[in-house]
Image (cartoon, helix red, strand yellow):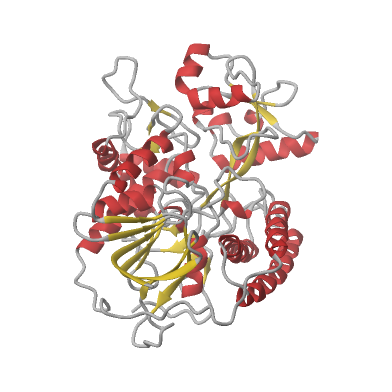
Amino acid sequence: MQHNTDILIIGGGAAGLSLALRLANTYHISLISKGILREGSTLYAQGGVAAVLDPKDSIESHVADTLAAGANLCNEEVVRFTVEHSTENIQWLIEQGIEFTRTSNNKDYHLTREGGHSQRRIIHAQDASGRAIETTLEHKVRTHPNIDIYEHHNAIDLITSTKIGKKNSNACLGAYILDRKNSRVNVFHAKHTILATGGASKVYLYTTNPDTSTGDGIAMAWRAGCRVANMEFNQFHPTCLYHSEAKSFLITEAVRGEGGILRLPDGTPFMKKFDKRAELAPRDIVARAIDHEMKRLGTECVYLDISHKPANFVRRMFPTIYERCLEFGIDITKQPIPVVPAAHYTCGGVMTDINGQTDLKQLYAIGETAFTGLHGANRMASNSILECLVFAQSVSKYILEQANDETADITLPLWDESRVTDSDEEVVVTHNWDELRRFMWDYVGIVRTDKRLRRAKSRVNLLLKEIDEYYGNFRVTSDLLELRNLAMVADLIIQSAIDRKESRGLHYTLNHPNLNGQPKNTVLRPMGFIPKT
């Protein structure tokens, strides 16, 4: 079955939802969500959104902080573009109905500070900012007459003009989408297709991300012929709650911003040994420091202590964290929180320009899926949702200025299942999934070596062959599609890490501990890559 739509948006986080709302008064939107619409990384974001909102702050200061955190690998033009559009995008969120936390006098918005920031510039909704943003935008999307929502649908692959035999220029025409409830693959034809599928942190054994973060957009764009960049820069959030029953629960950086202290099991603070900014150093430095101390002492975690602050202040500032930790018997007003680093954010992704355009005509990427040049070698805290908003605004403006699509009447080939059967060996998918995530954690984690990377490359090559054979013989399922994409993204991460013969930002290798001279991005080109004309 073929669905014809103006705009196909794959992904329902802050990037996808805000773009849909910006375009829906002009175009018909089809919005694809792998699970229920709200189930993505945005929902679990605690800290907030960085923006220049305080008269004592400035665009120059926010730009300078971002460039410093990015270890001299950010694109300064993109950083400035993003920061210059920060205030108006916060205002847009407020107009949508998001209720951000105010100061005690209720006149101003309360701004907090996080690692890498020299000023208080994080606007937040207590410690559940992502939930406030996601649920508010979700409600507006669900009630808009021009937006059709397809939940429990997996994007399989992009459809391009060259794939269907049109050789004059390569453009994205839509995608094959698996309807999981009906076990049917449908064709979605679109004038413009946008990848807003989030990152790929589920490639690691331990992550703060939900199960949906499997690198789908990055893998699909790569298979369709797009370049990817800087995939070696995987951000590990320093503080994920360490408890056997607490799956993927993040402890926001704002806890450290409000005075939280990282301590060893005996109570000794340790961050000043590693950086003069101590707990407010950028995430890469804090994560490596924790990793170093855990390995040195052979301990399973370190501790984040905010108990020296007044109990009422802690409960008011961090109600979500307070209640969640209390469920596990931890009263954060009286005792420290056990924490460990966990994979958190993919700084690399599909290469785009400032309008969100990829190497394929009519294909765009926004949010964590994209590589814009904003984050460099390390994303500064709370710049992620800001990027989603600013580039959704940029893509919408660009699309609204475009002429009508000349491929509107094309009939696309239907999905062919004539030579496949139902799988009788689902255990293969489960075993490969577990093996992949474990060797990525062991060999391509916070600290790397040439030997570990070679081992990882050898393992991923075998897995890719096995998965490709399995994919060619059996009907697609959600688990198989996610495994296929994760393995491909793992390979891109490993290739990029092998190529970077230095330690910069989030990529730290014992064999190459120093910086190279001129900073440069790691750009991977797919076989047969054709530059866009």
Above or below, 378 against 486 in this view is: above
Q: Is residue 254 left or right of residue 459?
A: left
Residue at position x 53%, y 12% in the image: 311
Question: Which part of the image, by quadrant, shows the N terminus?
Answer: bottom left
Residue at position x 31%, y 40% in the image: 59
Most extreme residue toward the front, as rendered?
182
In the foreground, 164 or 284: 164
Q: In this view, does 308 lie to the left or right of 74?
A: right
Q: Can residue 391 be seen in this view?
A: yes
In the foreground, 57 or 28: 28
Residue at position x 57%, y 20% in the image: 306
Q: Is residue 504 visible?
A: no
In the foreground, 397 or 285: 397
**Number of marks drawn:** 0
Residue 419 picture location, percent across and down: 58, 82
Where, by quadrant of the figure, is residue 207 drawn?
A: top right
In the foreground, 147 or 458: 147
Question: Which part of the image, by quadrant, shows the C terminus?
Answer: bottom left
Residue 281 picture location, percent across and down: 55, 35
Residue 367 picture location, percent across and down: 41, 53
Residue 227 picture location, percent across and down: 47, 70
Above or below, 304 against 353 in this view is: above
